């Protein structure tokens, strides 16, 4: 409408094949993030830089800022925390070595 008020309008929408993987840092967090590596089609549109709303299973999981992505380029998107996974860090091995006057301790988790 020509009412001098801002309006949001979808100008492009597309589905992109992606490879997903979990990213976890058990020492710091007890949860895992789902991350997607997405490849823009070589015949695809250039994705302009700006704010992007990320949806997973029709639910908003986050908003991020994207850089320009040309045709054929890959980019990564964080798809949020997967509530179905719990990450635990458990010490399973501890080994101490004496080398001269030095001591080396190795931990396995």
Image: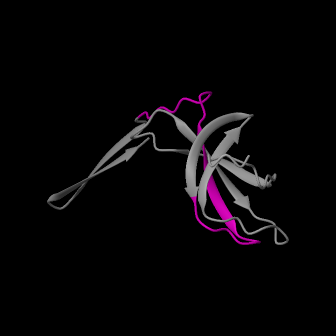
Residue 34 shown left or right of residue 40 in the figure: left
- Residue 44 at x, y percent in the picture: 82, 67
Corner quadrant of residue 72: bottom right
Q: Residue furthest front?
A: 3
Residue occupying the point 58% across, 40% down: 80
Residue occupying the point 44% across, 35% down: 89
Name the image colouring. Answer: one colour
Give above or below for 32 relative to 83: below
In this view, the residue in front, 109 or 35, is 35
In this view, the residue in front, 104 or 9, is 9
Corner quadrant of residue 70: bottom right
- Which quadrant is home to the C terminus? top left
Corner quadrant of residue 63: top right
- Residue 49 at x, y percent in the picture: 61, 64
- Residue 87 at x, y percent in the picture: 51, 33
Residue occupying the point 67% across, 68% down: 69
Give above or below for 21 relative to 102: above
The part of the chain drawn in magenta is: 66-90
Residue occupying the point 85% across, 71% down: 43
Q: Is residue 99 magenta?
A: no
Residue 84 shown left or right of residue 30 in the figure: right
The number of discs equals: 0
Q: Residue furthest left?
A: 101
Magenta stretch, overall SS: loop
Q: Is residue 86 magenta?
A: yes
Residue 46 shown left or right of residue 53 in the figure: right
């Amino acid at each position: 409408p020509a009412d001098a008020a801002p309006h949001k309008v979808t100008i492009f929408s597309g589905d992109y094949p992606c490879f997903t993987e979990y990213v976890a840092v058990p020492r710091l967090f007890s949860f895992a993030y789902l991350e997607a590596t997405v490849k823009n089609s070589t015949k695809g549109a250039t994705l302009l830089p700006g704010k992007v709303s990320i949806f997973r299973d029709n639910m908003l999981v986050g908003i991020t800022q994207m850089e320009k992505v040309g045709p054929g380029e890959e980019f990564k998107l964080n798809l949020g925390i997967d509530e179905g996974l719990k990450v635990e860090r458990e010490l399973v091995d501890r080994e101490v070595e004496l080398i001269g006057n030095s001591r080396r301790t190795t931990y396995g988790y």
